Image (cartoon, rainbow, N blue to C red):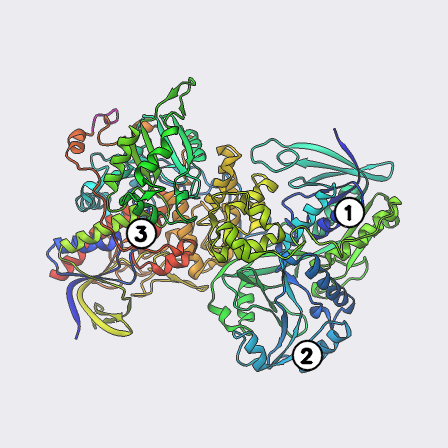
Amino acid sequence: MDQQVDVVVVGGGSTGCGVVRDLARRGLDAVLVEKGNLTHGTTGRMHGLLHSGGRYAVSDQKSAKECIEENRVLRDIAAHCVEETGGMFVKRPEDSEEYFQEKLEGCRACDIPVEVLDAEEARRREPYLARDIEKAIALPDGAVDPFRLCVSNAADAREHGARVETHAPVTDVLVEDGEVVGVEIEHETGPGKRVHREPGTTEEVRARHVVNATGAWAGNVGEMAGVDVEVRPSKGVMTVMNTRQVDTVVNRCRPKGDADIVVPHETACILGTTDEEVDDPEDYPEEDWEVDLMIETLSELVPALKDARTLRSFWGVRPLYEPPGTGTEDPTDITRDYFLLDHGGRDDLPGMTTIVGGKLTTYRMMAESISDHVCDLLGHEATCDTADAPLPGSESEARMEELMDDFGLRSPVARRSGQRLGSRADDVLSEQDPNPVVCNCEGVTRAEVQDAIGDAGSDLNAVRLRTRASMGNCQGGFCTHRIAAELAQEYPEPVVRDAEDELYQERWKGQRHALWGRQLSQAMLNHMLHATTMNRDGDPATLDDGVDFGAFDAGASAPGPGDGGDAGTAAADGGRADDDAATDGGRADDDAATDGGRAGDDATADGGIDGDR
Amino acid sequence: MAIDSDVLVVGGGLAAITAAISASREGADVRLVSHKASTLRQASGLIDALGYVPATEPATPLRDGPPTAGRELDRDEWPDPEGPLADPFEGIERLPETHPYRIVGGDALREGLDLFDELAGDAYRGSHTDRNALVPTFGGSVKPTARYPAAAEAGLASDDRPALIVGFRSLTEYDARAFAGRLEAAGVPFDVAGAEVEFAEAFRADAKVTRLAKALDHDEAIDATPAREALAKAVAPHLHDVVDETGGVDRVERVGFPAFLGDDRGDEVRAELADRLGADVFEIPMGPPSLPGLRLEDRLFDALDAEGVRFETGNPVVGIETESDGRVETVAVDRNGRETPYGADAFVLATGGLVGKGLDSDREGVREPVFDLHVEQPADRYEWFVDDAFGDQPYARFGVRPDERARPVGGDGEAQYPNVFAAGGVVGGADAAREKSASGVSLATGIVAGRQAATEATQ
């Protein structure tokens, strides 16, 4: 039975999640549909900066003011998604003094609290800054976890009656009598949670209004409705370092430029970025010069980056938009402001509104504005409370110390769990006993993984986004199979295997851009572990041809295989003592299990590492 | 004052030990130096020779140019490998010409395995036949291997006795039910069930396998029950979990555990469990830290000692001195910050591959850091990989290229130093992971490099 609702929101990024939450809280019957995971598009591919507005304080003060306003809101309603790192704009000798002053004045004009630091103070706060920096402006930039933010918005929407469908791409926009009346979606594995190997289905979701919040993909959805939405997608690279070289957001204080920001994020630092217009948001080259540029240019600010280990790189596409006829040449000059396109007024096609442009920091404000617009159109009277109502997980301070005691977790693990789960920590962690760590790099326990599986089905990339499992140094080498094993309580073996393969291949994608030095060693170690020891590439369970088990050695005491060529087996067996295995060698401590670096560093020898040598 | 020997082996893994013993048996005076503890402890303990001939040509065209966002991986991009091979020797001729087996020859593999059999003694099985065994490992798949620890013998997949796979709720490496399901999917000729039991809960969450092994070694009391008895009791209710194809219940005849059944007294632990359960007991090779790997490491170093090879660990080789005729005269060993020259008539490099740091790399290229030997590689680092994680990865084949005497050759195909030989992971040309050939390559190149080094030194 196809569904009739008030609003269907297309796109599970920050904007779409924010909109569906807002609408649901206002009492409208809303559905969110997303073609991949939540955050699958641009939101999941950003550097995690919670803007103070400083970045736009010279070029775009309207955006800057919105940023600082929303920055304050998110610290409040999404405390468990935000790390209040603080930030600074750092001036090197070759950077313009005039611009430094403009930045300072611009921030003040936008009500962004600033403090000028001399070089000594800046380096006291961030010891890895280059020795020759001149000064810096400190301001309240922060780090935000976009996955957690979106998931919390979606969860809140669901609590308020909304339906959230992921892995459900829109295949058609339904237009009847010159009006948009809904969308057709294709469920990759049937409605609800994604489960590998379940057959797909198609569904029509009929709605009084459709919100197109697909960002860089807005043109594709527009096309299905027969309207032009000219998004100008622009790609940017982000390079993930294996550790936090800085604990505050470090920006280069100069006019626009590539490679001018380092954002500390969880256990890592993310270097960004480039800005290059692309034709297709799903098909553009990811090139090595972009990665090189991040490392070379940002090491002018933080020299330690030059030889540091990078884990992976990823690219995102900005959904830049400018009104037809503006004709800006350079994508870096296109406004970062957002636009609400009412297709009724604009294209004489009522029933659909598109939102494009904007940035994650102001997602809530954008959602409020589009929800106001939709409510107006539908004649629905309700006030927006999303600036005041905390998101699930941020209702109260997480009780880290108590958690440590309550759940017997070693302290760093408890702290990490507490940070990720916020006020949900109690409920989640008490579900599993025993509760071993599944991902050592990120300190993710079974309880968190099971909680995420309950939410996301057999989709381990969705589990990853919710928990950070497999996002550390080993990039899944030591944990994809362990995360997959957690599925076995609920799902049959082939589902477990497919889910594991999918996660492993996804982790490989980003590592391709970090394949040198220690991460190349890690990649080799992962290859050895998964191919040599686990034989994931040659597993008879996945090969097309069957195996003649009788042709293989069945043990010295077993009758030899058909050819009778293995004489003397019985004697051999009889003559053997049972395993007198091994003297106790000094035990290798395995603190390393998560870090191939160890593997690399420990190893002298002949690729012994590899599983079998 | 230089420290001299006929042959100096650099490295401490299977290839280095094989080379050292092989050289010693040719009458050479041999010394071995290795930097850090051997990586054998991270190995599963299985001794592979050749399990597959993997595809080196894609079935569908690969991308042209840099990786692109959003490209969906074609799961059939790489054809299935040829295998698993029942006979490791018969596949050698179908490997690429630059493969070390093709260069040093299949006889070297056979000799290497013979030497291994002698060194490993009754702790290892498989020498009664040329055929590979299929051993279930912790991912739940079976893999072809030439030699396996005696502790793993009752688990062979060609054995048709019904089996129970035991997993532990507090160990996250595998889930026993999925493990059993995967064996069934592979079409194994026996009925199998998996059971997740409680036992390790008595230990702190995340207790290491070495801790569990110790508890079983010493039969420590767990809530007043000796550990072995407690483990048997936890498993006993599941001995009839196996259902055959007609729906009948079978009593299992063998029970598999993660490889933590004791360390010093593994045989005793297995025997007692077998007795209590009335079924054979086997260990499933695991990832790092690996008890079978640790046991093998201990055994091999004992063998080295017994052979009269002097060895020292903890000191890296940081430089070399050559003579005017191009021979290497000494290598500099860093001993607590002081460089000491070690002289020898011949040198064997067995420092490992990318993981063991026998090969080093940065964004510009891959190099061999000790002798700065030639490492063939594409100039563009974006040609070091393919998009399928399990495809024919160029990086997996990185390493020095040996001649038939195991001497690394330069870009011109000539030996770079007349008295330097290479063995093991530092040798390129094999995709040991996909071929399941890692140990075999170490043994084959180790035996040739050791022998040739001794010949060179004693000439």
Chain letter for the residue marked with disc 1 in the picture: A
Residue wearing tag 2:
A100
Distance of label 2 from label 3 (alpha carbons): 55 Å
Classify residue B396 as left or right of residue A553. Answer: right
- Distance, label 2 to label 1, CA atoms, is 43 Å
The residue that mark 1 highlights is A25
Quadrant location of the N terminus of chain A? Answer: top right
Q: Position of residue B459 (x, y in %)?
A: 11, 61
Which is in the foreground here, disc 1 or disc 3?
1
Could you tell me the amino acid type at mark 2? Phe
Q: Nearer the viewer, residue B293 or B133?
A: B293
Q: Chain of mark 3?
A: B
The residue closer to the viewer here, A575 or B394, is A575
Q: Could you say which quadrant of the image residue B348 lies in?
A: bottom left
Q: Which residues are magenta?
A: A560-565
In the picture, measured across the screen, residue B410 lies left or right of residue A39, that is left
